[in-house]
Amino acid sequence: MTPLEQEIVDLTRKWYVYVSMDHHKDRDCHWTIQQHFSYGNEPYFQAEHWGYVGDEFTGSKCTTLEEAQEELRDRLLFSIHDAKEWLKRQIKDYTDNPNEMYFGDVEQYKDILTILEEEK
């Protein structure tokens, strides 16, 4: 496995921790790269994610697998960043107003945030 592939694996593991904190569908856990052969044109690689929790994503048409992997890694980093920001807002809102609304399991949110913020 290349270092880039290992980084993607590590990021998908973190993403799985986040999407598993509540209800998720299996497709939230799949990040893919497809190689396309179409209309007699040169093949290209394209990163994709079709989850419910994160935004659906179709990457650009990349000429190499490594380019598509870099794009996939960057999208995972972006999605994890958004997840961390959401968790921080939930924790802050609960801290500021613990009796005003349902926040889920705030201690679980803190634990997941710690995992997402870990450096590999």
Image (cartoon, rainbow, N blue to C red):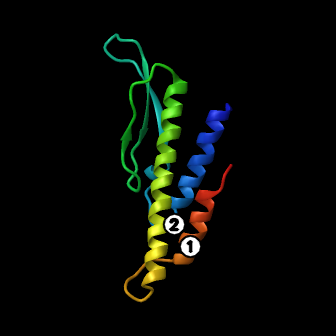
Tell me whether the residue at label 1 lies in contact with that at label 2, contact meaning CB atoms closer than 8 angstroms. yes
Task: Check the picture and name the quadrant holding the N terminus.
Answer: top right
- In the structure shown, which secondary structural element does the residue marked by tag 1 occupy? helix
Mark 2 highlights which residue? 21
Q: Residue at x 38, y 29 (%)?
A: 60
Residue 28 placed where, x, y %?
A: 45, 52
Q: Residue at x 65, y 39 (%)?
A: 6
Q: Earlier in the sequence, mark 1 or mark 2?
A: 2
**Residue nearer the viewer, 17 or 76:** 76
Residue 34 placed where, x, y %?
A: 45, 29
Q: Is residue 76 above or below residue 64?
A: below
Name which residue type carries label 1: Gln
Q: Residue at x 46, y 19 (%)?
A: 63
Q: Is residue 10 left or right of residue 27?
A: right
Instruction: Let me know if residue 93 appears in the view.
Output: yes
Name which residue type carries label 2: Met
Residue 116 placed where, x, y %?
A: 58, 58
Instruction: Let me know if residue 30 appears in the view.
Output: no
Q: Residue at x 52, y 24 (%)?
A: 65
Tell me the quarter of the picture where residue 23 sits.
Answer: bottom left
**Residue nearer the viewer, 32 or 117:** 117
Q: Residue furthest top?
A: 40
Q: Is residue 37 above or below residue 90?
A: above
Measure how far apart labels 1 and 2 are at the Cα level: 8 Å
**Residue nearer the viewer, 78 or 112:** 78
1 vs 2, front mark? 1
Mark 1 highlights which residue? 108
